[in-house]
Image (cartoon, rainbow, N blue to C red):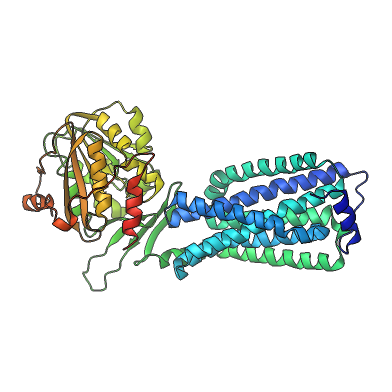
Amino acid sequence: MVDAEARRDAEARPGEELMDFAGRPRIARAAVLAAVFVCAACGLVYELALVALGSYLIGDTVGQASIVLGVMVFAMGVGALAAKPFQHRAASAFAAIELLLALLGGLSVLGLYAAFAWLDLYAPALIGTAFVLGVLIGAEIPLLMVLLQRIREQAAGSAVADLFAADYVGALLGGLAFPFLLLPVFGQLRGALVVGAVNAAAGVILVFTVFRPALSRRAKAGLGAGSVVVALSLGYAYAVAHDFEVNARQELYRDPIVHAERSRYQEIVLTESVPIVSGGVSDMRLFLNGDLQFSSVDEYRYHEALVHPVMAGVRGDVLVLGGGDGLALREVLAYPSVTSATLVELDPAVVALARTRPEIRTLNGDSFEDPRVRVVEADAFAWLRTAATRYDAVMVDMPDPDETATAKLYSVEFYTLVRNVLAEGASMVVQAGSPYFAPKSYWCIEATIRAAGFGTTPYHVDVPSFGDWGFVLATPNAPGPSLRSEPPAAPRFLSPSVLAAGAVFPPDRGPVDVKVSTLLSPHVLEYVRSEWRSY
């Protein structure tokens, strides 16, 4: 903010001369406020882009948001103070800051993805990027306040009100544009580049139209050259963004990527190994946000262990929560007693891939084409709250609780909702992670199921792609159910002796004292992050 004394001081300094806006102050003020609006929208998009990238790559949405927002807000204060010496050259300083912000903000997602894929320096790179962007964003408001007061000096309260009104409304636009326009249309890499271009244009156009007479020849030449450099850099990055993303993504996976897409909810990647020896077996793997979901070589071990114990007995109506690849459905549909199988999957892109990709259709036996199958595209937690049907068997085949979004699916509240849709004599099975690699996480899930009113029978099997993997079979309001299997045909893996052995846990991986996980206290998330970090 510039009061009368500061204004006279600025007049006495070398730099930009005060301009005469007589006859057009309203247009000039509208232009400044429009620039505030656009710059605020761009600044918020940069923040959201960093948070979203971290949640995709690291999976810790709350942690990433806390780091990014905390660092950027602190840095904005630093930037506001750092802008003081440049107030006597407010127009040229503002344009220079916008060009630098556009370049760094536009390239931020690309640079951080490179740091994650090739350099293993994501955390320090994120903090550094958030700090620099925050400093530049923080320097905008003081300089814009100076420019606004140069047009027509007004009371401090009124000037602040005008400026922050435009700033907050612009932030709303950026907050809505990021998830509903930029991500669906451009994706993360190109979306940030587009915003960078808009950011640069807003700053340069304002200065070169409204405040052009105040610029020296050197400032005009420097800003013009800077604009060309920024435009060329962002344009080149936009052109090569697709190839860059393909190469960076491939760096994260052992085998060649044969399919990759970014759905509304997650990154979906299929890899396939090429047999070196003639007659060798290829290995197709599905990854969601970098986490392995199945390997075609041994997925039958996992799915036989998941499905057959809970299907023992007569099971007419079956519910599968998750399992969008259709592999659990394949095992369920083998039972003649099954009259209906309902699958609830959040991400329709996973189901579409399982329905159309020939290799996955071969694996799942075209399970989605069976007339007994009904697919519901919904969040399982929300869907269970209004479900009216009762089921004879429920399979909870969800991704591991390593994110805030999935931790709620391993809570007392979630299992209570599942209990409410179970028919008389029905059972539930939950995939519960590795009792070897993550024993606290595994026994936390088992304890949480018991806290929801179930009797539990924990068991585990060996799945080479995953290691020692555990499940929990449960029945409401009863002791733990017996562990048995009655498949219609002999399984490839799950024999009676294998299943009996699965109920035995060695002393070093037996039950441990853990906390129960709830919606408001997701202890399973803490256990998963602390245990898997070691591997």
Quarter of the picture holding the C terminus: bottom left
Identify the residue at image location x=59%, y=60%: 131
Q: Does 64 sit left or right of 460 as displayed? A: right
Identity of the residue drawn at 45% across and 50% down:
61
Toward the viewer: 485 or 361? Answer: 485
Q: Quadrant of residue 384?
A: top left
Q: Quadrant of residue 298?
A: bottom left
Taking 231 as reference, is 3 left or right?
A: right
Residue at image point 56% right, 56% down: 71
Left or right of residue 399, residue 150 in this image: right
**Residue at image coords 36%, 44%:** 522
Residue 116 position, x and y percent, is 46, 64
- Give percent across and percent down for residue 419: 25, 32
Residue 247: x and y in percent read: 46, 67
Residue sticking out furthest to the bottom: 277
Total count of labels: 0
In the picture as drawn, the residue positioned furthest to the left comes out as 497
Whether residue 498 can be seen here: yes
Residue 186 visible here: no
Q: x%, y% of residue 50?
A: 53, 55
Q: Nearer the viewer, residue 190 or 1?
A: 1
Q: Left or right? Give the position of 439 relative to 381.
A: left
